Image (cartoon, grey):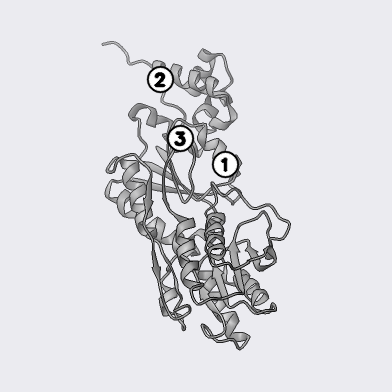
Amino acid sequence: MQSPSPRLTLKEMARRLDVSTATVSNAFNRPSQLSAELRERILSECREAGYAGPNAAARSLRTGRTGIVGVMLSNYLSYSFSDPIANQFLQGLAEIFERRDYNLLIVPSRDNVSQAQGIEAFVDGFIIYGPPEPEKLNRLMLQPKSVITVDFTLEGCVSVNIDNRESARLCAEHALRHGATSVSILGLRIIDANRVCRISNCNLFDEATTIAVQRLRGFQDAAAAANVAVPEERIWHIPDNTHELAYQAAREALMCAPLPKVLLCMSDRIGLAAIRAAKHLNLKVPDDVRITGFDDIPEASSQEPSLTTVHQQSIDKGRIAAEIFVGEREETSVVLPTEIIIRASCP
């Protein structure tokens, strides 16, 4: 009987390819360390030789599937799990993927994940929720794998979105219908600054990729149609969607003269913080100031007064992105409808 061929080792494969063992390992585990041409040559020759690689991720070369989906979040990991909208999105993903026996690998964009370089080799593709840091996005796009974007668009990729500009316009149009002449806007991540501030003399992020700037444009569209001026000094930037930062911005806005009669907020967390700030300043909502939010998180309906807001289908965003990924839905971009929910804060 003929003896079976000995199993190829990393060292033997490196000798055959006339490269170092580190180079072969990087081809499987840290693709960003190699040029696309060199990596493809190594992987191709490894396939022909029957070498499956130094780890479980490499063995997926034989099956073409790992059963792992990379989900890149646009913020810190701890923040993403505390944010109700991100939670709803992840819930929608999980509902579809667990039915198809996929596992999720959560990758935060703004955390230091240097030890996780090479995760591209472990996954079948990526769903990217919100625009990540450019360096991480560029590394992902080097891989010939499926990429679906949510809450932003990327050339060549299928996306799942809402019409943020039009939704914000309709909400602001409702808030302004009583003829308010003094309006302030509480924005979320609209400029490159890590502190609460007004946007005077600052460059806004790119509207094409940033939903917050799209919402700002919608607010401004409604104000212009109502002949209401909203100068830059009346627009605040909030770096993160937290109660503390939103409360700080809301207090500043509500202590300005003249008092804003309408406060347009880019998230429900900001809107709820603004209601609290108004109460602490002995202002009545909506008699003294009308306040709107965006998202329709559960707390928006239970707050006193309840928050007028834009309802978006965050769970469905996750479901649809997952269905496209696994082939249950046509591979084409989707824009989901929204609805203005009118409540006591801005009747």
Q: Say which element carries label 3.
A: loop
Indicate the amino acid at tag 3: Gly
**How far apart in space, not on screen, are marks 3 and 1 (Cα)?**
17 Å
Above or below 284: residue 226: above
**Mark before the other along the chain sequence, 3 or 2:** 2
Give the residue at x 48% y 67%.
173
Indicate the amino acid at tag 1: Lys
Above or below 333: residue 293: below
Q: Which residue is mark 2?
A: 47
Give the residue at x 35% y 34%.
65
CA neighbours of label 2 inside 10 A, class few (<14), some (14 to 19), many (20+): few
Residue 301 coordinates in the image, percent (x, y): 41, 76
Above or below 195: residue 146: above
Q: Which residue is mark 1?
A: 136
Give the residue at x 52% y 54%.
211
Q: Nearer the viewer, residue 257 or 74?
A: 257
Residue 160 coordinates in the image, percent (x, y): 40, 48
Residue 126 coordinates in the image, percent (x, y): 44, 42
Q: Which residue is mark 3?
A: 156
**Mark before the other along the chain sequence, 3 or 1:** 1
Q: Nearer the viewer, residue 160 or 145?
A: 160
Nearer to us of marks 3 and 2 is 3
**How far apart in space, not on screen, are marks 3 and 2 (Cα)?**
28 Å
**Mark before the other along the chain sequence, 2 or 1:** 2
